[in-house]
Image (cartoon, helix red, strand yellow):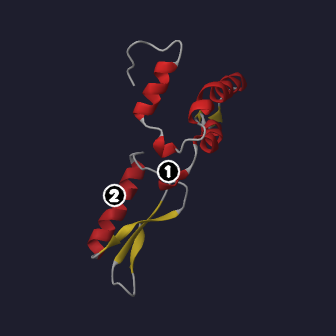
Amino acid sequence: MIKPDKHKDTGKWRARYTDPNGKVRSAGTFNTLKEAQKAAREKENQIQRADWDNPDLGVIRFEDWAPTALNRLGKDGKPIGVRTRVLYESQLRNHLLPTFGRMRLRDIRRGVVQDWLRTLPDAPNKLNC
């Protein structure tokens, strides 16, 4: 954990943590050192549980995020196979980008995806997502 620092003008404590990409972020400002430490620990715990939401993703559009996500697919540090990649790129280009491409990631919610799935020709009558 990065040691909280005290703002010299306001006297408030700023809680900081390092995100999974190595970027130092603020977890907020607090009246006491103890509150700041608790907030920073909570952010670090969220990262450890893979429950942390990247605040930058809220402004990123799906079309800008998707290629990076595709590049991260794989297992045990190995990339996905060539044929799998070609299939995923085709599905992304033909099905996902036309609907979600211009949307910000934070706006793609469960209900939006469910509504889209219902428009697909092979969509099941009852969705379990």
Which residue is located at x 40 percent, y 12 percent?
Answer: 125
Q: Which residue is mark 2?
A: 42
13 to 111, vertically: above or below: below
Q: Residue at image x 39%, y 82%?
A: 7
Secondary structure beneath dot 1 equals: helix
- The image shows residue 113 at horizontal and vertical percentages of 46, 30
Residue to which mark 1 is pinned: 58
Q: Nearer the viewer, mark 1 or mark 2?
A: 1
Residue 27 percent across, percent down from the top left: 39, 64
Whether residues under marks 1 and 2 lie with C-beta atoms below 8 angstroms apart, the answer is no
Dot 1 alpha-carbon crowd within 10 angstroms: few under 14, some 14 to 19, many 20 or more: few
> Which quadrant, please, contains the C terminus?
top left
Q: How many marks?
A: 2
In this picture, is 101 found above or below 126?
Answer: below
Q: Is residue 36 left or right of residue 115?
A: left
Q: Give, as a three-letter code, the residue at label 2.
A: Glu
87 above or below 36? above
In the rendered image, the quadrant that contains the N terminus is bottom left
Question: Mark 2 packing: few (<14 Cα in 10 Å), some, or many (20+)?
Answer: some
- Judging from the image, what secondary structure is the residue with disc 2 in? helix
Q: Residue, x 52% and y 54% (percent of image)?
A: 56
Q: Which quadrant of the figure has residue 43?
A: bottom left
Instruction: Name which of mark 1 and mark 2 comes first in the sequence.
Output: 2
Amino acid type for the residue under numbered disc 1: Gly
What residue occupies the far bottom of the structure in this picture?
Answer: 9
User: In which quarter of the view is residue 86 placed?
Assistant: top right
